[in-house]
Image (cartoon, rainbow, N blue to C red):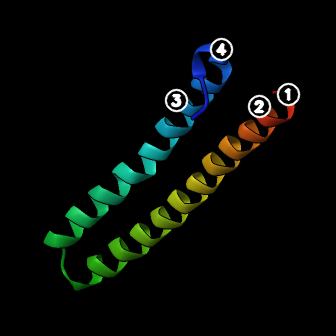
C-alpha cells in the first residue's frame, strides 16, 4: 500500500482519476436504464452508447493502473 500522507500529489491524482472514471460509469448506468424503457431502434442506439462508455471505462482503468504502478516503481526505486 502506498502511504499517501507523504504524497499529496498522488492523493489528488488518484482522487481526480477516480472522479473521471465515475463520469462514464454514471453515463453507462443511465444508458442501460434508458434501454430498459426504449423501443427497438432506440435500444440499439442505447447499446452502442453503452459500449462506447464501456470502452472509455476500460481506458480509465488502464490509466489509473499505470499511474499506480509508476508510483510504486518510483517508491521502490527511492526506498
Gap in angstroms between the C-alphas marked 1 and 2:
5 Å
Q: Left or right: where does residue 21 sit relative to residue 59?
A: left
Gap in angstroms between the C-alphas marked 2 and 3:
19 Å
Tell me what residue is drawn at x 56 percent, y 54 percent.
61
Q: Residues within 10 Å of mark 3 (few under 14, many from 20)?
A: few
Q: Percent from the top left, x then y, of residue 25? A: 39, 52
Kind of element beneath mark 3: helix
Tell me what residue is drawn at x 27 percent, y 78 percent.
43
Q: Is residue 27 above or below residue 14?
A: below
Q: Which residue is mark 4?
A: 6
Q: Left or right: where does residue 38 sit relative to residue 27?
A: left
Q: Which sits earlier in the primary sequence, circle 1 or circle 4? A: 4
Tell me what residue is drawn at x 70 percent, y 46 percent.
69
Q: Which residue is mark 2?
A: 75
Q: Residues within 10 Å of mark 2 (few under 14, many from 20)?
A: few
Q: Which residue is mark 3?
A: 15
Q: Which sits earlier in the primary sequence, circle 1 or circle 3? A: 3
Gap in angstroms between the C-alphas marked 1 and 4:
14 Å
**Disc 1 versus disc 4: nearer the observer:** 1
| Quarter location, residue 73 | top right
Q: Which sits earlier in the primary sequence, circle 2 or circle 3? A: 3
Q: Which sits earlier in the primary sequence, circle 4 or circle 3? A: 4
Q: Which residue is mark 1?
A: 78
**Disc 2 versus disc 3: nearer the observer:** 2
For the residues bearing labels 1 and 2, Cβ distance under 8 angstroms: yes
Which image quadrant: the C terminus? top right
Q: Left or right: where does residue 46 sit relative to residue 15?
A: left
**Disc 1 versus disc 3: nearer the observer:** 1
For the residues bearing labels 1 and 3, Cβ distance under 8 angstroms: no
Amino acid at each position: 500500500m502506498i502511504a499517501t500522507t507523504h504524497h499529496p500529489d498522488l492523493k489528488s491524482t488518484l482522487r481526480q482519476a477516480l472522479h473521471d472514471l465515475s463520469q462514464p460509469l454514471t453515463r453507462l448506468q443511465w444508458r442501460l436504464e434508458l434501454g430498459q424503457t426504449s423501443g427497438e431502434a432506440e435500444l440499439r442506439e442505447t447499446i452502442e452508447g453503452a459500449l462506447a462508455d464501456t470502452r472509455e471505462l476500460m481506458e480509465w482503468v488502464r490509466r489509473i493502473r499505470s499511474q499506480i504502478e509508476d508510483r510504486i516503481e518510483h517508491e521502490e526505486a527511492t526506498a
